Amino acid sequence: MIRLFELRTEKELSQRSVAKIMNVSQGTYNNWENSNTQPSIEQLIALANFFGVSVDYLIGYSDSSESDKNYLTERQREILKLTYGADPKLQDAVITILSSRTDK
C-alpha cells in the first residue's frame, strides 16, 4: 500500500504491532506495505480507520489525509484495536453494551 509505511512510522509502530492489531501475520502486513499483496476491502477500511485517514488517502488517490465520514477519534480507534479480530461473542457484547446507552 502506498502510504502504510509512512503512516506506521509516523505513529512509531512496528509492523508486528500493526499486524497484531489487524489480526494478520507480520509477513502478511509486510506484503501489504511492500505492495506484494493487497488487503481485503474490510481490512483496507479497518487500516484507514485505525490510522485515521480516508481509504483514498491510504491508497494514494487523495493527498488529503482527512476523512469526512471514516475519521475516528483516538478513543474510537482504541475501541477498534481492542475489538478487531476479537471473538464474535465479545464483539456482540460490546455492541449490546454500546447500543443500550441511555445518553443517546
Image (cartoon, rainbow, N blue to C red):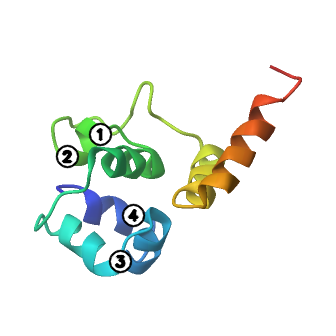
Residue sticking out furthest to the front: 89
Q: Measure the C-alpha gap from mark 3 to mark 2.
A: 21 Å
- Tag 1's secondary structure? helix
Nearer-N-terminus badge (3/2)? 3
CB under 8 Å between callouts 1 and 3?
no
In the rendered image, which residue does mark 1 sit on?
A: 55
**What is the number of callouts on the image?**
4
Q: Position of residue 54 (x, y in %)?
A: 34, 37
Looking at numbered disc 1 in the image, what kind of residue is underneath it? Val
Which residue is under mark 3?
A: 25
Q: Nearer the viewer, mark 1 or mark 4?
A: 1
Inter-mark Cα distance, 1 to 3: 21 Å
* Horizontal side, residue 39 vs residue 12: left or right: left
Q: Residue 20 location in percent, x, y?
A: 47, 73
Q: What residue lies at 28% left-to-right and 44% top-to-bottom?
A: 41
**Cα distance in 3D space between marks 1 and 2:** 6 Å
Residue 12 makes an appearance in the image: no
**Label 3 amino acid?**
Ser
Q: Is residue 24 above or below residue 26?
A: above
Label for residue 10? Answer: 4
Q: Amino acid at mark 4?
A: Glu
Circle on res. 20: none
Q: Are marks 1 and 2 in contact (CB under 8 Å)?
A: yes
Task: Report the residue marked by disc 2.
Answer: 59
* Residue 70 can be seen, yes or no: yes
Q: Earlier in the sequence, mark 1 or mark 4?
A: 4
